[in-house]
């Protein structure tokens, strides 16, 4: 069993019922945290929370107006929930662009805003934003995703500056393609946008920029998140931690 570095802490993870969010929830729970699984899928959130001894919050984070007055008693906040849309700008559906900005930038802002008062009162807090290599680099056909992740990077840095005097850190994790349902679902869109077969997408699109030619496993991202959430990371703030197989080294 891992060292109980998060014992007594309440960790809220968005998109916590699958992919990176689920891996983070499992890693935090194994280190003693009480996890709050936030997910659109109510059944999956409840099942995960029950298995990990936590609690579930079924919510549509894209309905950002409903988050205006939320207050969170969370010591650790992981902004992870996201979706993807792949299309040229000229064909990009405006409502899809708005959806990604609401879910992956506006909702994280509102959740940070909701969590900071408790963190400030406690004199301790951790905000961990699951960004992307696309928070630092751009790719064609991903205007909304790249815009949202670049905005998340800025939000994270401002949170770090404002939270520093209160014992609150804020950082981004920037993975390349992770083996998650989000990545699997975009293969067909990537194939269509690039005019290639679906079987070619991983090699020709997803791994073309990385020096290490494999997908990242969710547990690898979660291990970094668990360290950032722990006591040894108190001087780490305002940073963007790449886990991209060398993508942004180019």
Image (tube, rainbow, N blue to C red):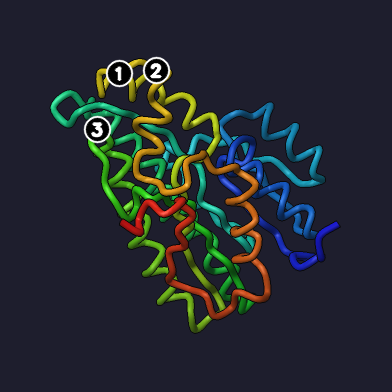
Disc 2 element: helix
Measuring from the top left, give residue 204's x and y in whole percent: 35, 30
Q: Crowding at label 2, few (<14), some or many (≥20) Cα neighbours within 10 Å?
A: some
Q: Residue at x 43, y 47 (%)?
A: 107
Q: Crowding at label 1, few (<14), some or many (≥20) Cα neighbours within 10 Å?
A: some
Measuring from the top left, give residue 206's x and y in whole percent: 39, 35
Rounded to the nearest angstrom, the CA distance separating label 2 from label 3 is 16 Å
Q: Nearer the viewer, residue 71 or 97?
A: 97
Mark 2 and mark 1 residues within 8 Å of each other at the beta carbon: yes
Q: Which mark is residue 198?
A: 2
Q: Nearer the viewer, residue 142 or 49?
A: 142
Q: Which residue is mark 1?
A: 196
User: So how many labels did they put on this image?
Assistant: 3
Q: Crowding at label 3, few (<14), some or many (≥20) Cα neighbours within 10 Å?
A: many
Q: Which residue is mark 3?
A: 141
Q: Residue at x 46, y 40 (%)?
A: 177
Residue at far left of view = 90
Residue at far bottom of view = 165
Rounded to the nearest angstrom, the CA distance separating label 2 from label 1 is 7 Å
Which image quadrant is residue 86 in?
A: top left
């Amino acid at each position: 069993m891992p060292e109980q570095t998060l014992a007594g802490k309440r960790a809220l993870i968005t998109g916590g019922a699958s992919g990176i969010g689920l891996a983070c929830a499992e890693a935090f729970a194994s280190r003693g945290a009480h996890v709050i699984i936030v997910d659109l899928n109510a059944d999956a959130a409840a099942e995960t929370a029950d298995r990990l001894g936590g609690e579930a919050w079924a919510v549509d984070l894209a309905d950002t107006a409903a988050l205006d007055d939320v207050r969170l008693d969370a010591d650790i906040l992981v902004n992870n929930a996201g979706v993807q849309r792949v299309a040229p700008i000229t064909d990009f559906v405006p409502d899809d662009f708005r959806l990604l900005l609401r879910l992956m930038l506006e909702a994280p802002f509102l959740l940070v805003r909701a969590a900071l008062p408790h963190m400030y009162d406690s004199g301790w807090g951790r905000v961990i934003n699951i960004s992307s290599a696309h928070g630092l680099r751009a790719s064609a056909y991903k205007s909304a995703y790249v815009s949202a992740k670049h905005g998340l990077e800025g939000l994270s840095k401002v949170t770090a500056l404002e939270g520093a005097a209160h014992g609150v850190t804020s950082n981004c994790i920037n993975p390349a393609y992770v083996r998650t349902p989000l990545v699997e679902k975009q293969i067909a869109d990537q194939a269509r946008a690039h005019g290639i077969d679906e079987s070619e997408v991983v090699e020709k699109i997803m791994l073309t920029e990385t020096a290490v030619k494999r997908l990242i496993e969710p547990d690898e991202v979660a291990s970094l998140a668990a360290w950032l959430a722990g006591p040894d990371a108190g001087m780490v703030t305002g940073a963007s931690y790449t886990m991209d197989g060398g993508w942004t080294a180019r």
